[in-house]
Image (tube, helix red, strand yellow):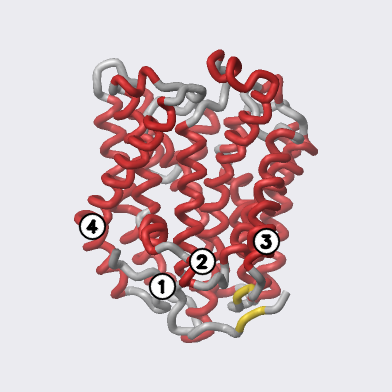
Amino acid sequence: MIQAPKTDAGRYYRPELDVVRFLAFMLVFLFHAICTTGDPRCSSVFKSYVPVVYAFAHACRFGLSLFFTLSAFLICELLLRERDATGTVHVKQFYIRRILRIWPLYYLGLLIGLAYAFLPGNDRNGVVEMGWFAIFMGSWYVVSHAIAVSPMSVLWSISVEEQFYLFAPWIAKYFSRRSLYGFCAVVLLMANGCLYSLGKAQAPDSSIWFNSLIQFECFAAGILLCLVLHGRLPAILLWQRLMLVAACAICWFFACYGLHSVFNSPSENPGSWPLIGGYALASLGCVLVMVAFLGINPRMLPGPVIYLGRISFGLYVYHELALDIIKRLPIGHAASFASPLSWLKAASTLGLTILMASLSYRYFETPFLKLKKRHAVIESQPIGG
């Protein structure tokens, strides 16, 4: 692979990563917005092709894996650049930046989740769940308990991110690049060991998907990509980039349709090796997407999509709330996955999500982001829209 030279060590902002963020969000949004289990109306439309349709729907879940891979890649890249530029990693500054970026919107989401739990007829388990989320143990709580019916239950994934941040700056500070390869190997062995055990025990999908140790496979993939590229950008042709995206789609689809790594009941658990293969394909697909976008000509990237990627954290936090609001409207009751109204329902939900995320970014998150910028060692994402 031909690679472009390194960029300025004092600044690292790649607008294509914002596009990847928005792509990751859209996949998660589709996974939550469309039907992924048996729907008679869906069966009547797609008939014998229903398993294929559901496999594509399940594959959208790996948008979250893409978020994790992107996060690990970018954090590793910024920290290693900081170490190269200053001789060390300023751990305190790292945590201040992460707190200012994540905690304000995260805890606002938890407050919304608490308020939602107390509404008449809603799931009171959401109160306990939000409590575990508040100490970043949400992923482990969901592994051992049924996930609450709450628009803020999606925040379990932030627990996984925060658990990654516990060791990320320390390994970047004290591990050589060679040692980081070894660290990633240990993480991959740990994740696949968990998959082997849970497959052998016929564990439910929730015990696998929400397991932080298993999700760390995506973080290892992101770190490995950072180490392999070593600050350079893939210089490949547009058709090659499109082929990489297509290869990612094939990986994710086969993980769901061929290996059944996403399933509905413990009796459908495919076993250890299909799970190991499925999650490996999920991580590989994420890396392929990253390589497909890194180094692309910025002039090919639509400005509105870059902006939507920039506010993707808000899009992620609010999208289930928007789904719940739309479901309570007449269109929400009329539309199903197989109904033409589903397109209008999805568009309305996406529009409401973008509106909430835009307002949140402009009036709530931006002041914290300006404070965060004061603690930056390597400049990264700009704040403006």
Task: Inspect this view and state whether residue 294 appears.
Answer: yes
Return the residue at label 3: 184
Asked if 357 appears above or below 90 in the picture, the reply is above
Q: Nearer the viewer, mark 4 or mark 2?
A: 4
**Callout 2, which amino acid?**
Leu
How far apart are labels 3 and 2 at the CA level? 16 Å
Residue in the picture at 66% in, 64% down: 239
The first of marks 1 and 2 along the sequence is: 2
- Position in image of residue 345 (x %, y %): 37, 30
**Callout 3, which amino acid?**
Cys
- Position in image of residue 346 (x %, y %): 40, 34
The first of marks 4 and 1 along the sequence is: 4
Asked if 360 appears above or below 133 in the picture, the reply is below
**What kind of element bears circle 2?**
helix
**What kind of element bears circle 4?**
helix
Give the position of the C terminus as an image quadrant.
bottom left
Instruction: In the rendered structure, find residue 273 and report the number of the disc placed on it.
Output: none
Return the residue at label 2: 74
Task: Inspect this view and state whether residue 124 appears.
Answer: no
Residue in the picture at 62% in, 36% down: 56
**What kind of element bears circle 3?**
helix
How far apart are labels 3 and 1 at the CA level? 24 Å
Question: Could you say which is closer to the camera, residue 334 or residue 372?
Answer: 334
Characterize the local packing of mark 4: few (<14), some (14-19) or many (20 or more) Cα atoms within 10 angstroms.
Answer: some
